[in-house]
Image (cartoon, rainbow, N blue to C red):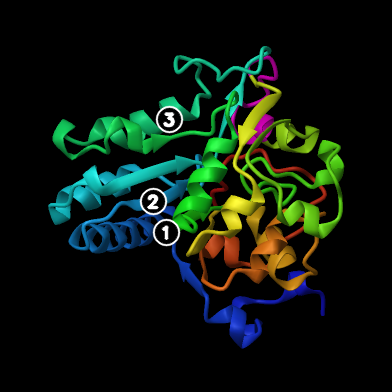
Amino acid sequence: MSFYDRTVAELPDLLRVRIKVVPDCAALNRLVAQEFGDLLAAATAEGRLLTAICPVGPLDYRFFVAEVLRRGLSCRNLRTINMDEYLDGQDRMIPVSHPLSFRRFMDETFFALLPADLRPLPENILFPEPDAPERITELVDEIGGADVCWGGFGITGHVAFNDPPAMLGEPEDLASFRACRTRKLTISPMSTAQMLMGGTNGNAEILPTRAVTIGMHELLKSKRYHCTFMRNWHAGLWRRAFLGPVTPTFPGSLLQEHPNLAITMTELAAAPPLVHTAQATGEKKTE
């Protein structure tokens, strides 16, 4: 039996106990938001900052806002480190006005939705800086790793913009990839194609080709790593990552080594991947 055919119930015990399967994206976001609320409440009670590495794409941060308001919490004790941001032709961050700006996304779906007195302090909303990417590495090393990192995988198995190093012209051995730090890079053609299909609906001109991204070193150093999967094509990716070999040719596989890994997926992503000769149109089928 191929590992692509295995159901969650058929997984090895050590992997299966890390996985939660939920009905849909709303249930997934509620679960992650509850985890966020629990971590934030604990950090606040202890008088310390909660440091979270945040992605753009896998999560709907409006559920975080609802959790904060429902529980009477405050994000004054929250420090966010975003995984990445697009760069323009001069290797500067794209402007916040750009439709694909991750800074814009975080503000519109999270920070600006909170009352002003409950928002994180501006100095605690961090993005990798193209002119000083080492600052993220230094911070993560100084605090001994973020408290939590949420994230999914791209089509290449990439985590943040850490595509397989052979696609980026970077050292291909496992040790070098495991140790790669926050840096600027050219996004791989496969990851660009994924965004064209799922993010811009074929509009290639609007897509930046460069990005600044947090590295595998900083990601793997997180004290807790929570992977989320909700798309139909995630069905094959998580199986390859967690049932295949640990290899830089599929970056997500390195998370097999993480000592505190949680995995949440929708029923769609949990199902064994189906193979179709004809490509889907994206329309919902009706009987």
SS state under label 3: helix
Q: Which residue type does callout 3 highlight? A: Phe
Secondary structure at badge 1 equals loop
Answer whether labels 1 and 3 touch (C-beta < 8 Å). Answer: no
Q: Kindly report the secondary structure that dominates the magenta region of the rendered protein.
A: loop
Under mark 2, the amino acid is Thr
Measure the C-alpha gap from mark 3 to mark 2. Answer: 19 Å
- CB atoms at circles 2 and 1 under 8 Å apart? yes
x, y percent for residue 147:
42, 59
Read off the magenta span.
Answer: 195-206
Residue 119 placed where, x, y %?
Answer: 23, 37
Residue ID for mark 2: 51
The residue located at (45%, 18%) in the rendering is: 96
Mark whose residue sits in front, 1 or 3: 1
- Residue 280 vertical position relative to residue 241 in the rendered view, above or below: above
Disc 1 to disc 3, C-alpha distance? 22 Å
Q: Measuring from the top left, give residue 79's x and y in whole percent.
A: 35, 44
Q: Which label sits on residue 105? A: 3
Task: Reply above or below: 33 against 94.
Answer: below
The first of marks 3 and 2 along the sequence is: 2
